[in-house]
């Protein structure tokens, strides 16, 4: 099973806007789960932990998680987030696939499943 990381803005000018960022990421994560793929949504992972440790702990942890993923799915506004831009750069360094929308990801997953089935069929 593939593991997909949701990358998008977390911080915002106020709590309401921050919650909207989290909700967008959670919505994307649910759509990926519906495709039968595992998801890491860091927005939901640490949503209530703000201020418990320095920010770099969360950011360093997110970069470690990315290292273990197969791909990133970008959420609206990612390009305005310093953290999300750093996540994209890390993903590029690791050669991970990066998708700008759920349809791109879905197409990739379908091709991957077809390739897996083909490999299974030819091994028989």
Image (cartoon, rainbow, N blue to C red):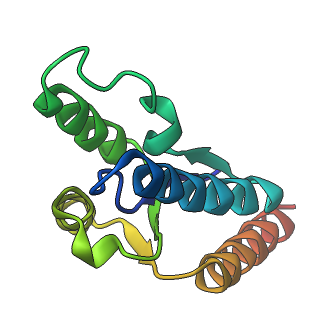
Q: Residue at x 82, y 58 (%)?
A: 34
Drawn side of residue 68 relative to residue 64, left or right: right
Q: Answer yes or no: is residue 107 visible.
A: yes
In-front residue for pair 101/91: 101
Which quadrant: the C terminus?
bottom right
Q: Is residue 110 left or right of residue 68?
A: right
Query: x and y percent of residue 60 in the render?
Result: 17, 34
Which of the two residues, 40 or 28, is positioned nearer the viewer here? 28
**Which quarter of the picture shows residue 119?**
bottom right
> Going 33% across and 51% down the picture, which residue do you hit?
14
Residue 15 placement (x, y as % from top left): 40, 45
Camera-side residue of 35 and 101? 101
Which residue does the image show at 16% across and 62% down from the upper left? 82
The residue positioned farthest toward the top in the image shown: 52
Q: Position of residue 77 (x, y in %)?
A: 37, 75
> Quadrant location of residue 94?
bottom left
């Amino acid at each position: 099973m593939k593991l997909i990381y949701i990358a998008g803005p977390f911080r915002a000018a106020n709590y309401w806007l921050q919650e909207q960022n989290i909700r967008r990421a959670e919505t994307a994560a649910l759509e990926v789960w519906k495709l039968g793929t595992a998801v890491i949504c860091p927005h939901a992972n640490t949503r209530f932990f703000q201020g418990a440790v320095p920010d770099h702990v969360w950011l360093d942890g997110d970069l470690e998680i990315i290292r273990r993923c197969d791909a990133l799915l970008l959420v609206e506004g990612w390009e305005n987030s310093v953290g999300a831009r750093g996540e994209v750069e890390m993903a590029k360094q690791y050669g991970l696939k990066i998708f700008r929308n759920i349809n791109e990801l879905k197409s990739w997953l379908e091709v991957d499943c077809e390739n897996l089935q083909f490999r299974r069929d030819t091994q028989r």
